Image: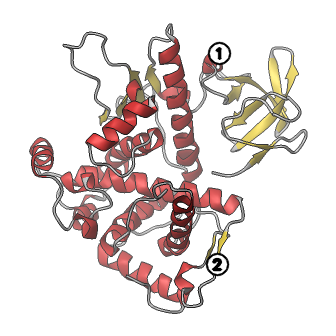
């Protein structure tokens, strides 16, 4: 994510800020501009200093302190670009549900920031029967009733409100043997299923998908049963980004899609801070990186990988110095890099930045060649 600053006083801002902590001005996010803007009240609307010629009002969910995005004051939409995809929100009469929903909305809005920056197609249920929609549901109070399952079904993404509770989410992460489990990760994974439907199945990319990920016609229910009964194969690290990705090609794609969004968003943040990685070890040219490009616009996946690998080694080293687990608990094997490259290619195809889908072998060759050019030496395995 990019860095923001108050247009009135220059104070650096977080994406979620609703008021400048320096000058006190109200803030609102203008999605069409990709800017968090300081505001000037103008009667029943607001003037955004980032675009003063057009009046704005807040998304209807601002009344719950769950959204700081703006909509045009003269428009018909009460909800912003992100919130108009909500189909069901929880009962907000209780403080716990309200607080958890606010945390969910923070993650959802960060998801939409990246989807919009990438230029991906986003249809609501009003625009398409299988448009992207969200149900945010709490488990029933009656213990005998089934719990809410987080998942995706024909464009509808369901998120269990319990995932917004840090203790409960950590318990589930431990029970499932996962190295990483966050609200933002859930959103990125589940929206991967949605974009599989839109960009792969509907986009004519099934043949190259099957070459890279396998045949999705394998019975999904039976595949999950096998996975939960037997676990991931012993060599999963060589072929999959997570153990769960090994369960079925659909889950492999969704995990890889989420990973691609991790890479793009984190690289943008690193670039916004001007981060450079130049370790003080003489024999490690492949640990040097400078994020001096826009990862949303980069056509060559190898450029992202060349910056990503040194950056993640650095941030993991920083975390270990604080006695914390690795910030990035993953390993990108050559097979996984091919899969991430597939996601990269279809994203850039739909936005018109790239015109051809590479095969798995072509993607791997391109990434290896790019890394060799970057480091002037073969990439380390």
Q: Where 212 sits versus 50, above or below?
A: below
Point out residue 277 in the picture as x, y percentages from the top left corner.
Answer: 63, 73
Crowdedness of circle 1 by 10 Å Cα count: few (<14), some, many (20+)? few
Point out residue 226 in the picture as x, y percentages from the top left corner.
Answer: 9, 48
Frontmost residue, 74 versus 161: 161
Point out residue 328 in the picture as x, y percentages from the top left corner.
Answer: 46, 59
Q: Where 176 sits versus 376, above or below?
A: above
* Residue that appears at 42% across and 56% down: 259
Instruction: Tell me if residue 256 can be seen.
Output: yes
Earlier residue among tags 1 and 2: 1
Q: Are marks 1 and 2 in contact (CB under 8 Å)?
A: no
Q: Which residue corresponds to mark 2?
A: 278
* Residue that appears at 64% across and 21% down: 65
Task: Tell me the tag on residue 63.
Answer: 1
Tag nearer the camera, 1 or 2: 2
Q: Which SS class for mark 1?
A: helix
Task: For the C terminus, give its image quadrant.
Answer: bottom left
Task: Tell me the tag on residue 154.
Answer: none
């Amino acid at each position: 994510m990019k860095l923001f600053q108050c247009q009135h006083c220059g104070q650096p801002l977080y994406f979620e800020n609703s008021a400048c902590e320096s000058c006190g001005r109200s803030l609102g996010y203008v999605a069409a501009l990709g800017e968090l803007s300081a505001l000037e009240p103008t009667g029943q609307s607001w003037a955004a200093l980032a675009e003063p010629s057009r009046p704005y009002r807040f998304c209807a969910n601002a009344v719950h302190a769950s959204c700081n995005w703006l909509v045009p004051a003269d428009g018909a939409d009460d909800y912003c670009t992100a919130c108009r995809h909500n189909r069901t929100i929880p009962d907000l009469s209780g403080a716990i549900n309200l607080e958890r929903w606010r945390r969910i909305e923070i993650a959802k809005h960060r998801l939409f920031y990246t989807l919009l920056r990438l230029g991906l197609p986003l249809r609501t249920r009003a625009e398409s029967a299988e448009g992207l929609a969200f149900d945010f549901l709490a488990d029933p109070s009656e213990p005998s009733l089934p719990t809410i399952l987080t998942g995706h079904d024909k464009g509808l993404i369901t998120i269990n409100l319990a995932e917004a509770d840090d203790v409960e989410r950590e318990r589930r992460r431990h029970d499932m043997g996962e190295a990483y489990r966050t609200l933002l990760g859930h959103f990125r994974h589940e929206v991967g299923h949605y974009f599989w439907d839109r960009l792969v199945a509907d986009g004519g990319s099934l043949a190259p998908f099957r070459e890279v990920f396998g045949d999705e016609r394998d019975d999904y229910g039976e595949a999950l049963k096998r996975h939960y009964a037997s676990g991931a194969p012993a060599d999963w690290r060589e072929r999959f980004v997570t153990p769960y990705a090994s369960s079925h090609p659909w889950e492999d794609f969704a995990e890889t899609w989420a990973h691609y969004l991790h890479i793009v968003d984190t690289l943008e943040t690193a670039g916004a801070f001007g981060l450079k990685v130049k370790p003080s070890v003489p024999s490690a040219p492949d640990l040097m990186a400078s994020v001096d490009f826009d990862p949303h616009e980069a056509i060559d996946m190898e450029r992202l990988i060349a910056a990503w690998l040194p950056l993640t080694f650095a941030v993991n080293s920083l975390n270990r110095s604080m006695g914390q687990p690795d910030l990035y608990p993953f390993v990108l094997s050559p097979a996984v890099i091919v899969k991430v490259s597939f996601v990269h290619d279809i994203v850039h195809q739909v936005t018109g930045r790239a015109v051809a889908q590479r095969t798995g072998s072509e993607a791997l060759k391109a990434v290896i060649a790019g890394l060799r050019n970057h480091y002037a030496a073969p990439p380390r395995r």
